[in-house]
Image: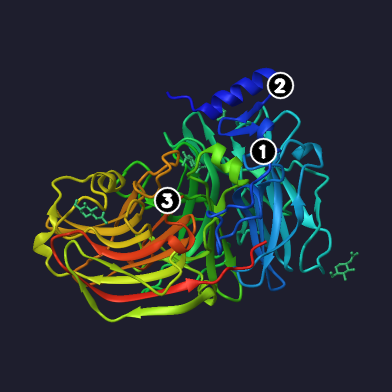
Amino acid sequence: MAVSPILLLLAIFSLIYGNGILPIEATHHVYRNLQTLSSDSSDQPYRTAYHFQPPKNWINDPNGPMRYKGLYHLFYQYNPKGAVWGNIVWAHSVSKDLVNWTPLDHAIYPSQPSDINGCWSGSATILPGGKPAILYTGIDPNNHQVQNLALPKNMSDPLLREWVKSPKNPLMAPTSANMINSSSFRDPTTAWLGKDGYWRVLIGSKIHTRGMAILYKSKNFVNWVQAKQPLHSAEGTGMWECPDFYPVLNNKPSSTIGLDTSVNGDNVRHVLKVSLDDKKHDHYLIGTYDIAKDIFTPDNGFEDSQTVLRYDYGKYYASKTIFEDGKNRRVLLGWVNESSSVSDDIKKGWAGIHTIPRAIWLHKSGKQLVQWPVVELESLRVNPVHWPTKVVKGGEMLQVTGVTAAQADVEISFDVNEFGKGEVLDQWVDPQILCSRKGAAVKGGLGPFGLLVFASRGLQEYTAVFFRIFRYQNKNLVLMCSDQSRSSLNKDNDMTTYGTFVDMDPLHEKLSLRTLIDHSVVESFGGEGRACITARVYPTIAINEKAQLYAFNNGTAAVKITRLSAWSMEKAKIN
Ligand SMILES: *[C@@H]1O[C@H](CO)[C@@H](O)[C@H](O)[C@H]1NC(C)=O
Ligand SMILES: *[C@@H]1O[C@H](CO)[C@@H](O)[C@H](O)[C@H]1NC(C)=O
Ligand SMILES: *[C@@H]1O[C@H](CO)[C@@H](O)[C@H](O)[C@H]1NC(C)=O
Ligand SMILES: *[C@@H]1O[C@H](CO)[C@@H](O)[C@H](O)[C@H]1NC(C)=O
């Protein structure tokens, strides 16, 4: 294993200062000695204009999102002292529209024994009568992970500025009786209420390599009793972080309506999402939930790699949904970490962003979820550019002019018909591997065609988001890729290529792609939201007004652009 210079440096510092690196838990390291370096604010080409981020420092998971008295509340894991993980508190911002955000003082920070070593992730539940309750993971004096409750101090304050912790904390803790691993017990979900009057909540955990969602029940939200069985578990999946469990409507024709977390019954299916700590991906299962027996039976397991479902096939983790009463929609929030080196993060003084909030619902096939940026985002669109239908021949590149290419929203649809030119795929291949073998620079039959974003004039740098259509088992198989291999001349960045198959029939459907471009993030939605890929890129030439945007086709078959609409995006007021 290669040791990076920064880690060597840290090791030296830790020798000098004793505890430069304080391992609390396998994936969380405190870079004590690096937490006071300040940022260089003069040159910040990678700060986003309309994605959520604080003015500086490290952020990770979205926590306890909720809507209260007409305001959205977003809490998030935050290090007030630096651009690396550590000193974690719940920072707090509010919004009227999920687009513009106002910062408030930290809502939850270490103040009692049950959270004195950290306030980690958790969720909000709106109790009957409209009172919000937050369950979160605290790190106690023994560095054990325990679950705590916090309630608003003043329900009349729409900003919910102050939170009071229960004197009964911790409400759930590892003991010698329950045998729960005290280093693997975290991230309570939003609770749901059964007809039996019991609240239920899940906590992520594992036993050896079996990941699990431990179920607890309570009548009063304070006294919680562990159920005999976890709601679900799977061998070999490792620690389950940030579980999320919610109902979706199984209506045909498909409906985008979301359901309250406690809803169950006919026409309802359930989604269990877990953030797999070993893989650093958010996976989900669709299944049936029997609330009387508290058993969740998924349609497919984690075992079969061909049916595995992810919210996002790029960089995306620790997500959480909220149900919005009144708007009848479920909204998904997620964290995207940096692909730059730790030393570059420290230099720029910040690390981590959140994705654009996405509405989420069950696809009419019943086999997967669909995600789409919340409609409120469109309020930032200005200066639209619309193209008439255009044919793009093999090898052609068409520049999209008239938009700020480093800060844009682009929707493009392709019509293909020369299906005979699709390359034949003899056996199933992992789509991410297929995308890295056949990147944008590898000519094909039907594709690659799509968008080149953050492109420099001479194409020394570009990120390609594209489709390629294969012939597999006598059907057309659509591959969607986000190819970062040429995204930057700075090779210190992680430039991994991402990919997924899109479950769609290009004979009868147009191949659509929407890409949100924002300085260092490329957030793409293929097949009308059936496949999402988020990437982080750090071009050195193609920054700000030097970034170009193109539609391209590097296949032998011509393709037709049936729609291209692009907008410059205004800067949102974020924190
Ligand atoms: C509660 O919040 C309301 C609205 O912000 C405010 O008017 C009131 O003074 C607060 N009450 C207390 C006890 O702080
Ligand atoms: C408990 O969790 C920690 C952290 O992941 C791990 O190192 C340890 O092996 C676990 N113990 C058991 C018995 O699984
Ligand atoms: C963050 O990014 C790095 C490198 O790009 C990756 O290896 C790591 O697993 C990521 N962490 C999470 C929690 O997503
Ligand atoms: C298209 O393919 C050619 C030949 O492989 C390659 O040189 C060129 O860079 C490709 N175009 C893009 C945008 O990748």
Q: Residues within 10 Å of mark 1 (few under 14, many from 20)?
A: many
Q: Position of residue 561 (x, y in %)?
A: 25, 73
Say which residue label 3 marks: 297
- Number of marks in the image? 3
Q: Which residue is mark 1?
A: 86
CA distance for labels 2 and 1: 17 Å
Label located before the other in sequence (2 or 3) = 2
Q: Which mark is residue 455?
A: none
Q: Position of residue 570 (x, y in %)?
A: 55, 71
Which quadrant of the view contains residue 467? bottom left
- Residue at 67% over, 47% down: 78
Q: Earlier in the sequence, mark 3 or mark 1?
A: 1
Q: Position of residue 242 (x, y in %)?
A: 56, 47
Q: Is residue 173 above or below residue 445?
A: above
Residue 283 appears anywhere in the view: yes
- Amino acid on which the number 3 mark rests in the picture: Thr
Q: Residues within 10 Å of mark 3 (few under 14, many from 20)?
A: some
Q: Are marks 3 and 1 in contact (CB under 8 Å)?
A: no
Is the C-beta separation of discs 2 and 1 under 8 Å? Answer: no
Up-down: is 331 above or below 274? Answer: below
SS state under label 1: loop
- Look at the numbered disc 2 and give the secondary structure of its residue: helix
Q: Amino acid at mark 1?
A: Gly
Drawn side of residue 173 relative to residue 243, left or right: right
- At horizontal 22% and vertical 66% (from top left) the residue drawn is 505
* Image disc number at residue 17: 2
Residue 574 left/right relative to 162: left
Q: Is residue 271 above or below residue 327?
A: above
Q: Position of residue 52 (x, y in %)?
A: 59, 59
Which quadrant holds the C terminus?
bottom right
- In front of the other: label 2 or label 3? 2
Relative to the observer, which residue lies in front, 504 or 460?
460
